[in-house]
Image: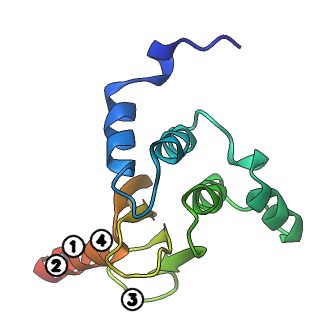
Amino acid sequence: MLWYLSDIYSDEFEKFEEQAQDIKGIEPLQAHVLTLLVMGEISPDGFPSVMKWCKQCYNEPSDEEKRMCAADEIIGGHGVEAIGINSEAPGKGMYVNLGDTYDTTLFYDHDECEFMVCSWGDWYDAQARFHSSG
């Protein structure tokens, strides 16, 4: 398949890549690869961490779970953690753990089906405010 830069590089791509550079300890090349991963331009299946994890699973992880596992490898995090799953928390998501609640990282919001760059602490605080005001 022939790729044209205009196919990959949209305003959305550039905006996400710029935001990805705010992730704690990330280099520009890592931000670029992370953006390609999140935007679906590269598959998570070729990442060693994803291949190793999938071999251990009875059921195939979701595409989002595999992307987060690959993102953890790219970013150099401490694993992917879930928040709000199987609880009464005001939202559900998963994030690459960078060691601190308010470190900027890659986050996946299950309710919105959206990847974003933020700290999980900021996301949780915003969810709690939204759900308490309703």
Residue located at (36% from left, 73% from top): 120
Quarter where residue 58 is shown: bottom right
Residue 96: where, in percent of width, then height? 51, 68
Residue 22 falls left or right of residue 71: left
- The answer for how far apart the CA atoms under marks 1 and 4 are is 5 Å
**Which residue, given by chain and number where applicable, does mark 4 sit on?**
123
Residue named by callout 3: 88
Quadrant location, the N terminus: top right
- The residue pinned by badge 1 equals 126
Describe residue 7's horizontal placement relative to residue 116 as left or right. Answer: right
In the picture provided, is 79 more to the left or to the right than 54?
left
Task: Give, as a three-letter code, the residue at label 3.
Answer: Glu
Q: Are marks 1 and 4 in contact (CB under 8 Å)?
A: yes
Nearest to viewer (mark 2 / mark 3): 2
Identify the amino acid type marked 1. Answer: Ala
Residue at left offset 37%, top offset 55% = 116
Asked if residue 20 is positioned above or below residue 23 in the image, the reply reads: above
